[in-house]
Structure formats: structure tokens, C-alpha cells
Image (spheres, rainbow, N blue to C red):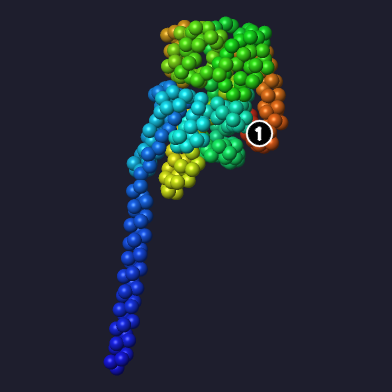
Amino acid sequence: MKRRDFVKAVGAGAVLAGGLSACGGEQSATAGSKAQDRETFTWRMVTTWPENFPGLGTGAARLAERIEAMSGGRMRIRIYAAGELVPALEAFDAVSRGTVELGHGAAYYWKGKAPAAQFFAAVPFGMNAQEMNAWLYYGGGVELWKTVYEPFGILPAPAGNTGVQMGGWFNKEIASVADLEGLRMRIPGLGAEVLERAGGVPVTLPGGEIFTSLKTGVIDATEWVGPWNDLAFGLHQAAKYYYYPGWHEAGSTLECLINKTAFESLPEDLRAVVLAACQSINLDMLSEFTAKNPAALVALKDEHGVDVRPFPEAVMQKLHAISRDVTAELAASDPLAQEVHDSYFAFFKNVRAWHEISERAYYNMR
């Protein structure tokens, strides 16, 4: 009887000790998890935009604010405008090298490094913002984008859209295709190649240099974004004619460049925070441009007497024909560019057919 009682007592003690040990292990794991949850990260973001520039610069700043808020303060992002830490058009390199963890810009700026990147910003006479987002998020676009940036150690994420842009500011009338001959115009990406083949002279300039270049005659024309941004830049003081539509950028997608090594060092929940913040800014920026452009257009016309006019039909037809040659030749130059091209235009064909009887039909009817 005493032996049995002793064995029971020993067994009960072992169970109790084991239970306490298990609890201790659980508490230790929980404590470790909480310690990880409290870890903070201070990142830096460079942009291609002037400081606090409406829509673009403020959009990048808002992205940083949302990452900090959504992370409960566990991530803090220091913003550097174009030229503060690196020149505007060196943001890609800064993120690739790991000099900074984040960048904000447009993919066509990096065409010299990855020609296929241009498809993820804007294609002349291509998809609008709604269609671009559909392709990127649900048509395989983001996956291809990641593949294009993989050799550079960068993870891309859509992080803004301007919607359909304006055709640009010109110091002379564009009455025919002949008026494009020798025209020095600030224009990036595939649109620059199209203009060059039409006889123009494309010039690459960051946003902060546009006004002075146009005002002093270094360039004859420039595209930028649309009424809200163009009014803020004062471009109406440097050119008289304001043409539409933005054939070269029908739905300009902006990007967040994320250093892949830094991203993978984050806890899983913070990775989700960064990507969710990018997606929220993608919607937010498009909404803001759509809301702010109308009043700015009225101000340009009524207060500043800007001559707003459409491009001649013959000019549009010529540029449209050239644009298809440009994109086809880009695709033929590289297997990955061909894969991106084929995905883009296959999606475009299908979504265009749908929009003919939905969006366009509704616009025409209303």
C-alpha cells in the first residue's frame, strides 16, 4: 500500500513538473514572439519626385506614413526627395545596392537597365489605369514584373496611378505630323521612342528641371502628368498650347521599389503591411488625381487663358501606327521582354473587347 502510494506520488509530481515545464516553454516562446513583435525597423525611401510635390511626392510620403501606422510604429520610413540623397534617376540603383530599402518612381525610367520594365509603367495607346491594375493583380503582371527585377535584387509593387494624362505643353501648334519634325520634347519611356520615329527629339529630364528647360527654350514641349500637377509646376507660364489626350500614358502605374534582402528580413506580418500599404496608395493616388484634375483644368482655362486643344486625328493615327512597331521590336529584342509583351497584349485584347460594350458603351451613352 505504501509502495503504491509512493509511486502515485512520484507519478503525480512528474506530471506536475512536466506541466510546469511545458508552461514554461510556452511562456518562453510567447515571450520570444512578443520580443520579435516589438522589434523596430528604420528604413529610408528615395523618390524621383520633388519634395512634397502634389500627388506624386505626397503620395510617396503618404505611403511611408501608412506603413508606420499600419505597423503600429514598428516600421519608420525616412523620405528623401529627388536629389536629397541620390539624383532622381538613380533611385533604382540605390535600392538595388541596398543603400536604401525603398524607392518610389516609374518603371520606364529604368529602361536602360531592363527594357521590359517599360511595360509596367505605360504603353502608348495601351491600357488605362483600371485595365493595368486588372492585369497586374489578376493577369500575371506583378509576377512578370518580379521576374524582370529579380537580377537587381528588387521587389516591385504597384504604388500609384495618375490615370489618363494630358498630351503635353507645346510652344507651337501641332497641326500635322510635319510639326513633330525636330521637336525637342521631354518625354520618357516608350513614348519617347515613338516620338523619335515620328521625327521628334526626345529629351530625358527629371520633373524638377522641366519648367526651366521649357521656359528657356532648351526644349520645345513637355509632357508631365495632368492639370493638377501641371498647374502646380506652373507650366502654363512656359508654354501656350495644352494638348490632349495623353496617348503615351493612358494609365501610368507608379511603383514602390523594395530591396528584396531587406524585405525578407522583416517578420511575415510586416511584409504584409508593406505590400498592403502599397496597394492602398495605388488606389488612393488614382482617386486623388481624378478628384483634383477637374478644378485644376478649369483654373488653367478660365484664370490663365490656356489654349486646350486635341491632337489632330492624322497625328494620332501616325503615332498609333509607330507605337505598335516600337513595342513589337522591343519584344523581339529579348525573350523576357517578349513574354511580358505577349502577356500584356493578350490581356489588353480581352479587356478591350469587354470594355467596348461596358465602359466605352456607357461613356458614349451618358
Give the answer, above or below, for where 26 lies relative to 7. Answer: above
Q: Position of residue 92 (x, y in %)?
A: 51, 31
Give the answer, above or below, for where 311 lies relative to 146. Answer: above
103 left or right of 180 in image: left
Q: Residue at x 47, y 24 (%)?
A: 87
Task: Indicate the amino acid at tag 1.
Answer: Ala
Q: Position of residue 195 (x, y in %)?
A: 63, 17
Q: Quadrant of the N terminus?
A: bottom left
Q: Residue at x 29, y 88 (%)?
A: 5
Picture quadrant of residue 45: top left
Q: Position of residue 216 (x, y in %)?
A: 49, 7
Picture quadrant of residue 352: top right
Give the answer, above or below, for where 28 lies relative to 179. Answer: below
326 left or right of 86 in image: right
Q: Residue at x 60, y 27 (%)?
A: 112
Q: Camera-side residue: 205 or 355?
A: 205
Q: Residue at x 34, y 53 (%)?
A: 34
Q: Camera-side residue: 53 or 301?
A: 53
Using the rendered image of the protein, determine whether residue 364 is visible from the camera's viewpoint. no
Numbered disc total: 1
Per the image, the residue denoted by label 1 is 337
142 left or right of 277 in image: right
Using the rendered image of the protein, determine whether residue 35 is visible from the camera's viewpoint. yes
Q: Position of residue 289 (x, y in %)?
A: 46, 25
Q: Camera-side residue: 342 or 182?
A: 182
Q: Residue furthest bottom?
A: 1
